[in-house]
Image (spheres, rainbow, N blue to C red):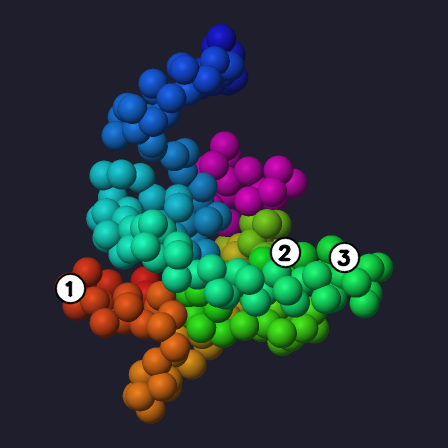
Amino acid sequence: MSLKVASGTIIVLSDMQSVKDILDDRSSETAFRPSLHAADVVTEKKYIPLANPDNHVWRMGRRAIQPLVSHQAVQEYLPVAELETTQLLHDIIHNPDGLCHHISRYTFSFIASVVFGKAAPTSDSPELAHFNNYMRHQSSTVSPEAAPVDLIPILKYVPERWAPWKQLWTETRRLQRSLYYSFLEQSERRIESGAKSGAFIERIMDRQEELKLTREMVA
């Protein structure tokens, strides 16, 4: 089924075989994503999930991330998953009213442990609070209520002093950089002191020159 929206066409796939044939088997042709100007500004076009297959960021990111999701690598994460799951069950039993906070902590702590070697032991951990604040800002930059800069391109050229959406982009980028650079700097200090934790970021830093990644792309 196809829908005509303004000057564009939306194709709706409702059959599983069609989805596999088009999005999986022909992913090199269909994996392109629409541009999100706000996200591009915040990330300076260095965010791998928003990059297209013909983009060098996507190619380098794919080479960097593949080892993280290999079968062997996933097996190495099981002890972390078991530890975080045990903590989650403990938190739910002792404070069932905070279920949403416990799940948020569990998700963030598992990913941060695997990628950066930094856990969030409690729901009020400063790293988790920082991440949640950043995600609220990030969601606002691309939400339907945000300035439609992709539909009305002239909005990109409004000076920031009169453009609250640009002020939001600036603050979101500040939060993003402060969060991920803090993780990166902690990892750098561990490596310098010879106390590697086996985190994924350490493997990326070892291959930084090979993968031709800038420090910001690593973070």
**What span is in magenta?**
142-158
Residue 110 location (% of width, % of height): 53, 63
Give 152 or 88, whichever is nearer the viewer: 88
Residue 77 appears anywhere in the view = yes
Residue 177 left/right relative to 120: left
In the picture as drawn, the residue positioned furthest to the bottom comes out as 193
Residue at the spot of label 2: 136
Residue at the spot of label 3: 99
Was residue 146 drawn as part of the magenta stretch in this picture?
yes
Residue 114 location (% of width, % of height): 44, 65
Please identify, in this view, whether the residue under mark 3 or under mark 1 is nearer the observer.
Answer: 3
SS state under label 3:
helix
Q: Main secondary structure of the magenta part?
A: loop
Q: How far apart are the two marked residues, 1 and 2, measured between alpha carbons?
A: 35 Å
| Mark nearer the N terminus (1 vs 2) | 2
Give 112 or 152, whichever is nearer the viewer: 112
Residue 84 left/right relative to 46: right
Residue 44 appears anywhere in the view = no
Residue at screen point 54% across, 72% down: 119
Residue at screen point 22% across, 67% down: 208
Judge the density around disc 3: few (<14), some (14-19), many (≥20) Cα neighbours within 10 Å.
some
Give, as a three-letter code, the residue at label 2: Arg
Tell me: residue 90, above or below residue 54.
Answer: below
Give 209 or 190, whichever is nearer the viewer: 190
Q: Quadrant of residue 138?
A: bottom right
Q: How far apart are the two marked residues, 3 and 2, measured between alpha carbons?
A: 19 Å
| Mark nearer the N terminus (3 vs 2) | 3
In the picture as drawn, the residue positioned furthest to the left comes out as 210
Circle number at residue 210: 1
Give, as a three-letter code, the residue at label 3: Leu
